[in-house]
Image: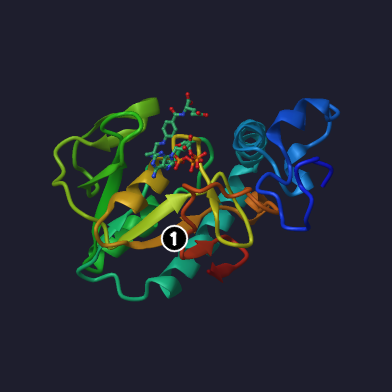
Amino acid sequence: MSDQKDTNDAPSEFASPACLMHEIEPAYDPTSAGEAAPSDIRAWRKTERQRLVDERKSLLATQRQEFTRLIANYLNHVIADVAGRNISMFWPFLGEPDLRGWMAAATSRGATSLLPVVVAKRTPLIFRSWTIGERLERGIWNIPVPADGKQAIPDVVIAPLVGFDRNCFRLGYGGGYFDRTLAHLDRKPLAIGVGFESQKINTIHPLAHDIAMDVIVTDAAVRYR
Ligand SMILES: Nc1nc2c(c(=O)[nH]1)N(C=O)[C@@H](CNc1ccc(C(=O)N[C@@H](CCC(=O)O)C(=O)O)cc1)CN2
Ligand SMILES: Nc1ncnc2c1ncn2[C@@H]1O[C@H](COP(=O)(O)OP(=O)(O)OP(=O)(O)O)[C@@H](O)[C@H]1O
């Protein structure tokens, strides 16, 4: 600590001043240094999201199907008793695992399946019930959402991952929707992140708003927080 005002050994509040970040080599990953400013972390996440989504999209269809089958098997263990529970799923896009078959099976065992709906940017998601055959409409990013479903509060939220880390933190598409939703619900649902093992990263560099998943399920493992 070289600050002239610091005459004792007490830790300074700003061990790594953000104002010095411009002095670091442009090619250097600021997030690997331990301390990084939230703005650097946000920029790093943007690049990391793109890399992870591109990698996920490049999986062969047969691999994706096999991995998705393994994820569905694990989900049957993690949520053994689905009857009477409101379970939020997702309509797959950009190479996310297609768990609509699992969703239909859960419905036949007495679950109510819900899909997330973005009602306005930067606000929590709402959830509407949906079963096969019911009408859908286009939501944000053209993701289909239930047109007539009943709004309901989920007991279990199954959130697709763009990335995840060993502490069960989730990286999504950057809207902050699941974090806002989990922070907003009166009764916190069981939060399960699902994705492929190849989406594992060392750390997402969690920020104050990030809420960890209770469980992460991939084709290779079930991780409890
Ligand atoms: N299949 C599926 N459905 C889902 C989600 C999901 O992850 N997967 N969501 C999970 O949340 C919600 C939609 N998530 C979204 C997240 C971000 C943006 C978005 O507009 N992103 C900005 C970038 C934000 C930034 O980098 O600052 C953009 O593309 O312009 C849109 C939707 C609800 N439905
Ligand atoms: N509870 C919250 N209240 C206010 N803003 C929030 C909250 N949670 C997240 N945000 C904001 O949302 C933005 C995106 O957050 P983040 O990078 O964690 O998104 P994400 O988890 O990848 O996206 P998503 O959940 O939509 O897939 C951040 O700028 C963050 O400040």
Seen from the viewer's position, the closer of residues 7 and 219 is 7
Q: In the rendering, at what x and y percent does residue 164 appear?
A: 59, 53
Q: Residue at 16% of width from left, 47% of height from top? A: 151
Q: In the picture, residue 84 is in which quadrant?
A: bottom left
Q: Residue at 52% of width from left, 35% of height from top? A: 94
In the depicted structure, whether residue 85 falls above or below residue 114: below
Q: Residue at 59% of width from left, 61% of height from top? A: 219
Seen from the viewer's position, the closer of residues 17 and 146 is 17
Seen from the viewer's position, the closer of residues 64 and 117 is 117
Q: In the rendering, at what x and y percent does residue 77 appear?
A: 44, 75
Q: Is residue 87 left or right of residue 135?
A: right
Seen from the viewer's position, the closer of residues 59 and 3 is 3
Q: Residue at 51% of width from left, 42% of height from top? A: 172
Q: Residues within 10 Å of mark 1 (few under 14, many from 20)?
A: many
Label 1 sits on what residue type? Ile
Q: Is residue 91 left or right of residue 113?
A: right
